């Protein structure tokens, strides 16, 4: 039984707090050697009193990014959990890999923007990139012990969001408050809105493409409103494996630390008889074009996924501010992808430049 020495980047956010819960539950398996928060100094101080051996960084302070990168390379760490919202986790994640640390990825942007780069550096350095998102953890769990050539398809489950049953013509009228009402998970604003547009699932498809080295053509989505089945793998012989559990992020975080082993955890037990029914339906791809935009971006690769992500962030913010209607989020992203340049195996600078260009284009069109 190995004890993992973990750095948590983004310790005051929802994933970070769940990770601290997991560390409290299994001190023999998980030590905390580093903690960062962006601006919540009080939360960081409280956590550092509880885990006094941890180095701490408040990343909004002067030189924050540099110190974050340094923390990600902490000589005593063997696993770095990146749970920073937005694109700020990318540089520390790449630095952690270069320093030989395993990476647990909770920030979608890292693999969406720079999946090729991240996975290539991880291969070169011989470190692992572990999923923390519930869907990817489910696939990771279903794949355990299976030979890679046995897999035919990955199937991500999707709650369908608050507009699963909303008629297409009503989507132009929905208000930000309605879009933020997620049926099964309680989350931050951006991710809640992404669940309503299905861009959350779009980003997860691209993440899955890199994490599991699977072409987009073999990554599917099925709507499952109860969020009990967290995702599935279909094998060549037609057999499917699924991972089930209550919606509790502590479970995927814990598995990233203990895998392939398992220990007692904090997540409540699933009572299938109490669930009664599990429903599945096809996503409304025409009415919610985010999934097809992900297939396009993930197939053409290069800087397209980074541009999709950036354009979505700008358009999502404009919708939340009441400046544009809901369907304009998809239209903005589609327009940015239309003019996106083809770049093969982009480096970090090209990715960051494409991200900036997509933000500029989207803002210009929305102004
Ligand atoms: Mg998810």
Image (tube, helix red, strand yellow):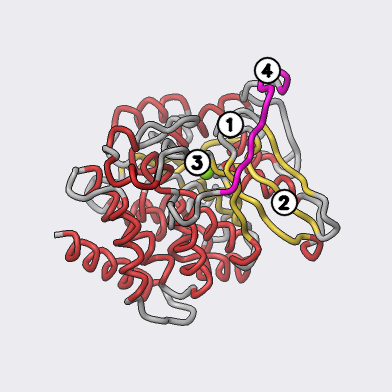
13 or 217, nearer to the observer: 217
Circle on res. 116: none
What range of the chain is rendered magenta?
272-282
Circle on res. 233: 2
Q: Which residue is mark 1?
A: 226
Does 142 sit above or below residue 52?
A: below
| Whole-number angstrom distance, CA of label 4 to CA of label 2 | 25 Å
First in residue order: circle 3 vs circle 4: 3
Secondary structure at badge 3 equals loop
Q: Are marks 2 and 3 in contact (CB under 8 Å)?
A: no
Q: Which residue is mark 3?
A: 160
Q: Nearer the viewer, mark 2 or mark 1?
A: 1
| Whole-number angstrom distance, CA of label 1 to CA of label 3 | 10 Å
Asked if the stretch drawn in magenta spans residue 28, the answer is no
Point out residue 162 in the picture as x, y percentages from the top left corner.
42, 35
Does 355 sit above or below residue 104?
A: below
Q: Are marks 3 and 4 in contact (CB under 8 Å)?
A: no
Q: Residue at x 35, y 74 (%)?
A: 338
Left or right: 286 as drawn, with respect to 327: right
User: Can you name the residue that lies furthest to the right here?
Assistant: 237
Asked if the stretch drawn in magenta spans residue 277, the answer is yes
Secondary structure at badge 1 equals loop
Point out residue 48 in the picture as x, y percentages from the top left corner.
41, 30
Q: Are marks 1 and 3 in contact (CB under 8 Å)?
A: no
Point out residue 255 in the picture as x, y percentages from the top left corner.
66, 39
Q: Residue at x 40, y 60 (%)?
A: 91
Circle on res. 274: 4
Point out residue 299 in the picture as x, y percentages from the top left corner.
53, 72
């Amino acid at each position: 039984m190995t004890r993992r020495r973990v750095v948590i980047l983004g310790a005051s956010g929802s994933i970070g707090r769940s990770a601290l819960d997991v560390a409290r539950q299994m001190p023999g398996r998980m030590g905390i050697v580093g903690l960062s928060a962006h601006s919540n100094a009080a939360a960081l101080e409280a956590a550092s009193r509880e885990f006094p051996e941890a180095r701490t960084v408040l990343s909004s302070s002067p030189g924050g990014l540099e110190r974050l990168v340094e923390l990600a390379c902490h000589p005593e760490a063997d696993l770095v959990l990146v749970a920073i919202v937005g694109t700020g986790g990318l540089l520390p994640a790449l630095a952690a890999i270069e320093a030989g640390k395993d990476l647990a990825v909770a920030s979608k942007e890292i693999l969406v923007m720079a999946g090729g780069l991240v996975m290539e550096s991880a291969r070169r350095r011989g470190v692992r990139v572990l999923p923390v998102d519930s869907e990817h953890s489910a696939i990771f769990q279903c794949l355990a012990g299976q030979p890679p050539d046995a897999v035919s398809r990955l199937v991500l489950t999707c709650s369908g969001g608050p507009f699963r049953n909303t008629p297409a013509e009503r989507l132009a009228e929905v208000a930000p408050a309605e879009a933020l009402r997620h049926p099964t998970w309680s989350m931050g604003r951006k991710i809640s809105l992404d669940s309503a547009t299905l861009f959350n699932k779009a980003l997860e498809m691209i993440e899955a493409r890199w994490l599991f080295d699977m072409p987009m053509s073999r990554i599917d989505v099925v709507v499952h409103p109860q969020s009990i089945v967290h995702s599935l793998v279909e094998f060549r012989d037609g057999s499917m494996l699924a991972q089930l559990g209550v919606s509790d992020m502590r479970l995927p975080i814990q598995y990233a630390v203990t895998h392939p082993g398992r220990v007692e955890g904090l997540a409540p037990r699933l009572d299938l008889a109490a669930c009664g029914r599990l429903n599945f339906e096809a996503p409304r791809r025409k009415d919610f074009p985010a999934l097809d935009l992900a297939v396009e971006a993930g197939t053409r690769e290069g800087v397209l996924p980074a541009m999709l992500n950036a354009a979505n962030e700008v358009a999502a913010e404009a919708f939340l501010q009441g400046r544009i209607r809901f369907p304009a989020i998809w239209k903005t992203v589609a327009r940015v992808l239309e003019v996106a340049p083809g770049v093969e195996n982009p480096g970090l600078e090209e990715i960051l430049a494409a991200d900036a260009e997509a933000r500029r284009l989207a803002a210009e069109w929305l102004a």
